[in-house]
Image (cartoon, grey):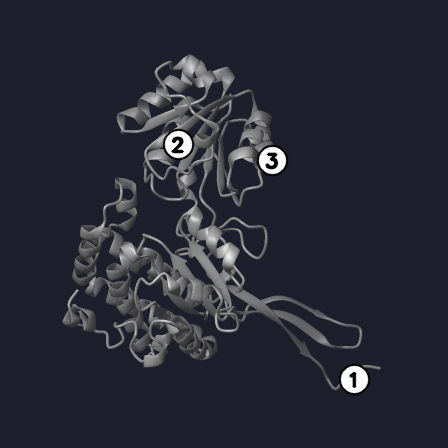
Amino acid sequence: MNAEGESKLQGVTTASANPVQDVPAQAQGQGAMAALAHRARLAARTLAQSSSATRDKALWAAAAALREATPAILEANTQDLAASTANDAFRDRLTLTPERVEAMARGLEEIADLPDPVGRVLEEWTRPNGLRIRRVATPVGVIGMIYESRPNVGADAAGLCIKSGNAVLLRGGSESLNSARAIHAAMQAGLRSAGLPEDAVLIAPDANRAHVAEMLTASGLIDLIIPRGGRSLVERVQREARVPVLAHAEGLCHTYIHSAADFAMARRIVLNAKMRRTGICGSTETLLMDAAIASALLPQIVADLAEKGCTFKADAAARAIVPDLPAATAKDFATEWLDAVLNIAVVDGVDEALDHIAQYGSSHTEAIVTADENMAIRFMNGVSSAVVMWNASTQFCDGGEFGFGAEIGIATGRFHARGPVGVEQLTTFRYEVIGTGQVRP
């Protein structure tokens, strides 16, 4: 994108589209992220005190700016794609289309329509001495968002943070830098339109890898780091961060077909769970099927998926039924393919399915297909994953599908938030104590 394109997106004035604008000269390069985080922290104070109506106005205006800037965003994305040498699944995550830009805009509007998560009274009680105590939802502060490949993540993260009263500092991958900048310009246009500080949504000045290290050690400036990407990124963040981390682990998702499953339903669900979009974290990577039905159902499912271009890695029991399936290794069952590749294992009942998931899963999303409610409950109680589904595709693990408008990631840890992270999960709380003159004896 040329200089004129960066300063104006299809008629939307974006004076701050240049991500290094107003960063002190001595802070650009080494120290640039600390300077941006400081600006974000100042903006977060204003945002936290703004009204819900003002934040919603910013989101609606940002949605309009995204639509108006669609040609410029797609041109920027074309530049990113031209520079990419990645495989088809990665390119799919990187690719923007008019429909995907429109989905970003609609997502912002859906976020705006959500109830205000800030100021909610979570709990309230009165002590014997008359003190009234209440727990009230408040913004976290400054969110550091480190993500790879999918440029729409920047819009989702910015929208969720604005709604929840948080400032956000974005560091996207080098492969999507042009797209991320174009989207960022539209988000700042929305903030300007509502009279909110543009510094509430900031972006790294370039693709320098040193920016990640600086974000991870910005204790006191960044309040929470959210990594969204591959295993190596998440492991690095967890290893090096001196700031609290809300981790998004890889999506090694399983679909288990129980012996009481409806065959037509099972075929429909597995086809969607694997092949709808292979490059998203909610895509099923391993199919588990009960031995009691495998000889009848497995060849049908393999044929369904093979017709759509899927390839397979199968255990010995599955290959005994469909002999031309390639053999799977333990490493295959531990791999998040993010591609049209499906692991297959035949199991002897729900307990063996749970054992397989416990050994190879990433605590993301698991699904069971069965007409037996007792077995479904047993399965759902037996997995430790953040999301478990009964008779539904794992690809429904998505903030938009959960009614959150969008998501900033899928949290797979055990604390604070699990599953799709929306506006409520981006708040913390304070205690408010209201007295009538009490003093402590």
Tag 1 secondary structure: loop
**Point 40% across, 19% down: residue:** 298
Q: CA distance from mark 1 to mark 3?
A: 50 Å
Hey, which quadrant is residue 178 in on the image? bottom left
At label 2, the amino acid type is Ile
Compared across the picture, whether 193 is left or right of 283 comes to: left
Mark closest to the chain's N terminus, 2 or 1: 2
Q: Is residue 347 above or below residue 150?
A: above
From this viewpoint, is residue 339 visible?
Answer: yes
The residue identified by callout 1 is 439
| Tally of marks | 3
Where residue 441 sits in the image (x, y, percent)? 84, 82
Disc number at residue 123? none
Q: Is residue 362 above or below residue 330?
A: below
Tag 2 secondary structure: helix
Dots 2 and 1: beta carbons under 8 Å? Answer: no
Q: CA distance from mark 2 to mark 1?
A: 62 Å
Asked whether 283 or 169 is in front, the reply is: 169
**Point 80% across, 73% down: residue:** 128
Where residue 339 sits in the image (x, y, percent)? 33, 37
Q: Is residue 192 above or below residue 420?
A: below
Residue furthest bottom in the image: 437
Can you tell which of label 1 and label 3 is closer to the viewer? 3
Q: CA distance from mark 3 to mark 2?
A: 21 Å
Q: Residues within 10 Å of mark 2 (few under 14, many from 20)?
A: many
**Point 44% across, 42% down: residue:** 251
Mark closest to the chain's N terminus, 1 or 3: 3
Q: Residues within 10 Å of mark 3 (few under 14, many from 20)?
A: some
Hey, which quadrant is residue 294 in on the image? top left
Disc number at residue 382? 3
The residue identified by callout 2 is 269
Compared across the picture, whether 377 is left or right of 218 comes to: right
